Image: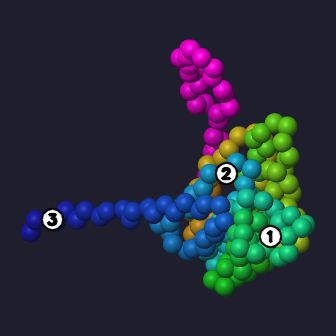
């Protein structure tokens, strides 16, 4: 009797980009959550007992003191993003006591400007401390962006620095015009 060759195909990995103001929680072993961060923060949570994980991505730590509540921009703020990520983890069976956190991003990419990245990272660390969620890894600060991948079902994370190795800008030649020219 001839042997049959059975080809097995590996399951396809599905990538979902988590952009500013979004979060996602999953147990899907074929899902990879990905994002790119500058001064923004991504918190990755994983519960090894429940085999579930998630990621958020927020732009600023807290709304300005002058605003009343979060309003329609709630997703931009860490205050909202951390709450919804943790609540969704709990809703899907994770326990606060067994959750582990990683923080990424928080770069201060523009010299001489407010250190928004540092503020974001400090906010996220304090939020996790106040919520009794253990921070096991933090890759924040610096001046370079980061690309982040999380496999939520396993808690595996890959973080790569995005260096400023773009080609140098070339000067643009401006034709000489006769008459008056106003530059603005």
Circle 1 sits on which residue? 79
Quarter holding the C terminus is top right
Circle 3 sits on which residue? 3
- Compared to residue 42, the image places residue 128 above or below, namely below
State which mark lies toward you, 2 or 3: 2
- Compared to residue 175, the image places residue 35 above or below, namely below
Neighbour tally class for label 2: few under 14, some 14-19, many 20 plus, Cα within 10 Å: many
User: Where does the magenta region start and end?
Assistant: 158-184
Circle 2 sits on which residue? 37
Residue 28 appears in the figure: yes
- In the rendered image, residue 111 lying in the magenta stretch gets the answer no
At 61% across and 73% down in the image, what residue appears? 25
Q: Earlier in the sequence, mark 2 or mark 1?
A: 2
Neighbour tally class for label 1: few under 14, some 14-19, many 20 plus, Cα within 10 Å: some
58 left or right of 6?
right
Q: Main secondary structure of the magenta part?
A: loop
Q: Quadrant of residue 91?
A: bottom right
Give coordinates of residue 145: x percent, y percent: 68, 44
Residue 159 appears in the figure: no
Find the distance from the CA under tag 2 to the CA under tag 1: 18 Å
Give coordinates of residue 47: x percent, y percent: 68, 73
Q: Quadrant of residue 77?
A: bottom right
Q: Earlier in the sequence, mark 3 or mark 1?
A: 3
Kindly identify which numbered label has been placed on residue 61: none
Quarter holding the N terminus is bottom left
- Comparing 3 with 38, the one in front is 38
Q: Quadrant of residue 85?
A: bottom right
- Comparing 65 with 159, the one in front is 65
Specify the color scheme: rainbow
At 81% across and 36% down in the image, what residue appears? 111
Element on which disc 2 rests:
strand
Find the distance from the CA under tag 3 to the CA under tag 1: 60 Å
């Amino acid at each position: 009797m001839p042997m049959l060759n059975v080809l097995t195909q590996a399951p396809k990995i599905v990538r979902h980009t988590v952009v500013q103001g979004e979060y996602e929680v999953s147990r899907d072993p074929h899902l990879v959550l990905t994002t790119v961060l500058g001064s923004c923060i991504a918190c990755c949570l994983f519960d090894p007992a429940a085999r579930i994980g998630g990621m958020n991505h927020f732009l600023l730590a807290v709304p300005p003191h002058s605003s009343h509540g979060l309003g329609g921009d709630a997703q931009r703020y860490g205050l909202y993003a951390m709450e919804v990520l943790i609540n969704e983890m709990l809703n899907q069976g994770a326990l606060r006591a067994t959750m582990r956190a990683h923080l990424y991003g928080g770069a201060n990419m523009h010299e001489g400007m407010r250190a928004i990245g540092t503020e974001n990272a400090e906010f996220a660390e304090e939020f996790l401390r106040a919520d009794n969620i253990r921070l096991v890894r933090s890759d924040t600060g610096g001046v370079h962006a980061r690309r982040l991948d999380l496999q939520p079902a396993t808690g595996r994370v890959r973080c790569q620095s995005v260096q400023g190795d773009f080609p140098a800008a070339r000067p643009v030649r401006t034709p000489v015009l006769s008459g008056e020219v106003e530059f603005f």
